[in-house]
Image: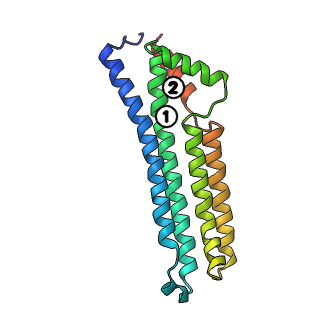
């Protein structure tokens, strides 16, 4: 059974949801920058805390937690992209948005820097700076730390960077083709 032809009101609703999803992705990225700023300001030791030996361990653990939070926020933007592509592929399949049809052709033919890649760059930069912060603090304030913190940071950094680059630039776990095929199947 073919898909129903969406009404003009349906089209308006879908376009509104698409705009809302794009705005949510930008808002989540802004939230990530804000959380980053708060946590980094929080882990910089004050003069009173410099006597404490545990300050560097706290700094490492806080930045590990920050990277995990950043990663989950990045995953949320990625899942919003799934919903975005589900809606846009519906509009393409029902031929109710010539813009989406043309935009899809453009994206498939040319390389471009749309929303996903700049968002990925921001998350990469925030994660990278987060993981370097304890090393910077330890060198500036002449604090010592156990070498296993360096190994944990390196491991976490490599995993974070590989996954964010893969999802942001290499289309890992992208579902647009899958969504398109499902809409086509339903439209037969």
Q: Above or below — where is 150 with respect to 94?
A: below
Residue 143 placed where, x, y %? 63, 82
Q: Above or below — where is 66 with respect to 21?
A: below
Q: Nearer the viewer, residue 115 or 167?
A: 115
**Could you tell me if the residues under marks 1 and 2 are in contact, i.e. CB atoms within 8 Å?**
yes
Residue 44 placed where, x, y %? 52, 74
N-terminal of the two: label 1 or label 2?
1
Residue 149 placed where, x, y %? 64, 73
Q: Is residue 138 left or right of residue 119?
A: right
Q: Above or below — where is 76 with respect to 10?
A: below
Q: Above or below — where is 151 with respect to 52?
A: above
**Regarding mark 2 in the picture, which secondary structure is present there?**
helix
Please tell me how crowded label 1 is: few (under 14), some (14-19), or many (20+) other residues with Cα within 10 Å. some
Q: Quadrant of the N terminus?
A: top left
**Regarding mark 1 in the picture, which secondary structure is present there?**
helix
Q: Residue at x 47, y 24 (%)?
A: 88
Res 185 visible: no
Number of marks drawn: 2
Please tell me how crowded label 2 is: few (under 14), some (14-19), or many (20+) other residues with Cα within 10 Å. some
Residue at the spot of label 2: 179
Residue at the spot of label 1: 82
Residue 148 placed where, x, y %? 67, 74
Q: Residue at x 53, y 16 (%)?
A: 101
Q: Is residue 114 left or right of residue 111?
A: left
Res 132 visible: yes
Which numbered disc, 1 or 2, marks the residue closer to the eye? 1
């Amino acid at each position: 059974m073919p898909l129903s032809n969406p009404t003009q009101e349906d089209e308006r609703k879908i376009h509104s949801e698409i705009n809302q999803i794009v705005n949510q992705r930008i808002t989540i990225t802004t939230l990530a920058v804000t959380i980053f700023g708060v946590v980094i300001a929080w882990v910089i030791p004050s003069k009173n805390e410099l006597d404490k030996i545990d300050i560097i361990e706290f700094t490492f653990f806080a930045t590990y937690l920050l990277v995990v939070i950043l990663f989950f926020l990045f995953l949320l933007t990625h899942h919003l992209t799934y919903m975005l592509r589900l809606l846009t592929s519906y509009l393409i399949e029902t031929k109710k948005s010539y813009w989406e049809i043309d935009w899809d052709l453009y994206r498939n033919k040319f390389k471009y820097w749309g929303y996903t890649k700049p968002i990925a760059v921001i998350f990469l930069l925030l994660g990278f700076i987060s993981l370097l912060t304890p090393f910077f603090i330890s060198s500036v304030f002449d604090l010592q730390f156990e070498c296993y913190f360096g190994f944990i940071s390196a491991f976490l950094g490599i995993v974070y960077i590989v996954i964010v680059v893969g999802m942001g630039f290499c289309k890992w776990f992208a579902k647009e083709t899958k969504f398109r095929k499902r809409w086509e199947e339903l439209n037969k």
